[in-house]
Each structure stands twice: as C-alpha cells, then as structure tokens.
C-alpha cells in the first residue's frame, strides 16, 4: 500500500492484516505465457569476423615485446591468422590497410615503457660503478649490465621517421637538377655559304 493519507477503514484493514496470525489464502497459479529468447552469445556474435581493436593492440604489443612466436600463439587461441599478426605488429588493423597504422601509438607507448625501465636500471648500474669497484672485478659485471640496458633502450625506442635525405633531419631538402650533356653529333648541322 502506498504511503499517504488513507481513510480510517483502510487503515484498520491493513492493521488487522499485520496482527493476524493465520496463513494468507493461497492464490491459484496462473498459467504463464511467454516466449523464451536466447541471449546473444558473448563475444563477436555469430557471423561477425572482425577482431576487436583491443585484441589487435594486445597482439601487436606482444609481438613487439615478447616476440613473434608468443604473438602467434596468442592469435592462434583466438583463431587469428599469422598474416593478421604481422599486420597488428605493424600497427595496422588489417592486412589490407598495411600502410595505415592507427595502433602504432599504442605499440610505441609499450616500447617506451620498457625503454624507461631499462634506462632506470642503466642509471642504477652506472651509479654503482665507483672508484673502488673499478679496481675490482665486479665493475666489469656492472659495465655488462649497463651495456645490456643500453642495448635494450636502443632496441625498444620507437623508430624515428626518416626524411627524404635519409639522415633523420627534418630540415629542408634541396634537390638540384642538372641538364644532360649532349654531344655535338646530336644536333643538326646546317652548312651556310658566305
């Protein structure tokens, strides 16, 4: 019963229902009519073959950080072809759009994360190389750690786009065209009498 102002008779009727100890009368069951509808299955759904973009990013990141074999194994579990793994590792969303790389920033972020961690280990190893340790053999081990961390940093940093002149410079590019030299035999000779 909703709250509000009610008549005294309605109030007494409801109050008597609260105080009664006898069983309420059972209501006969009504026949249920309805239709059972299957819920759509989780995932892509029937007939949808598009790979979710989150999975594309994950496979591309796995290929870049853990290696191609790990990415192929992950893709195999989802029924994704090896050629699609190559496209996802490139940052593309499909093999047909290999030249467009919308997922490349995600892969670069993952590489930067690893690179930053290696850089922190490199700096820690360099801090522990002291004058005392330079005289002992443990400095060689620390130098090995520093060398390994710098190699990881070099391998993990995203590629910088190359400019047309190939040196990574983003400055202006000058192209000089020189005319082809022709020999005298290529020209028509006109003899003139004076």
Image (tube, grey):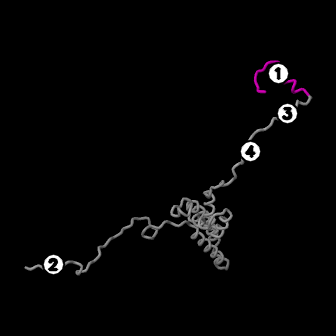
What is the spatial separation of the Cα atoms under label 3 and label 4, in whole angstroms?
Answer: 23 Å
Q: Which mark is residue 11?
A: 1
Return the residue at label 3: 28
In the image, taking residue 29 as reference, residue 180 lies left or right, namely: left
Q: Circle 4: is it few (<14), some (14-19), or many (20+) Cα within 10 Å?
A: few
What is the spatial separation of the Cα atoms under label 1 and label 2, in whole angstroms?
Answer: 129 Å
Which of label 4 and label 1 is nearer to you? 4
Residue at screen point 56% across, 67% down: 157
What is the spatial separation of the Cα atoms under label 4 and label 1, in whole angstroms?
Answer: 42 Å
What is the spatial separation of the Cα atoms under label 4 and label 2, in whole angstroms?
Answer: 100 Å
Residue at screen point 9% across, 80% down: 193
Q: Secondary structure at mark 3?
A: loop
Which of label 2 and label 3 is nearer to you? 3
Q: Do the residues under discs 3 and 4 have CB atoms within 8 angstroms?
A: no
Camera-side residue of 1 and 78:
78
Q: Earlier in the sequence, mark 1 or mark 2?
A: 1
Q: Circle 1: is it few (<14), some (14-19), or many (20+) Cα within 10 Å?
A: few
Q: In the rendered structure, which segment of residues is drawn in magenta?
A: 1-20
Q: Is residue 6 magenta?
A: yes
Q: Is residue 9 above or below residue 176?
A: above
Residue at screen point 67% across, 62% down: 78
Return the residue at label 4: 36
Q: Is residue 109 above or below residue 130?
A: above
């Amino acid at each position: 019963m909703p709250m509000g102002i009610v008549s005294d008779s309605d109030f007494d009727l409801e109050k008597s229902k609260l105080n009664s100890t006898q069983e309420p009368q059972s209501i006969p069951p009504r026949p249920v009519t309805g239709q059972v509808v299957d819920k759509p299955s989780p995932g892509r759904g029937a007939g949808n073959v598009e790979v979710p973009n989150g999975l594309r990013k994950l496979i591309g990141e796995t290929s870049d950080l853990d290696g191609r074999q790990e990415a192929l194994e992950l893709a195999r579990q989802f029924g994704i072809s090896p050629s699609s793994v190559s496209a996802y590792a490139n940052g593309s969303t499909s093999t047909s759009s290999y030249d467009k790389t919308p997922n490349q920033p995600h892969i670069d972020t993952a590489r930067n994360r690893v690179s930053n961690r290696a850089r922190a280990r490199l700096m820690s190893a360099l801090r522990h190389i002291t004058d005392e340790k330079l005289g002992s053999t443990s400095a060689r081990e620390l130098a090995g750690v520093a060398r390994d961390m710098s190699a990881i940093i070099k391998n993990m940093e995203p590629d910088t786009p190359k400019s047309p002149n190939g040196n990574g410079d983003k400055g202006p590019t000058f192209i000089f065209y020189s005319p082809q030299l022709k020999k005298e035999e290529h020209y028509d000779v006109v003899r003139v009498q004076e």
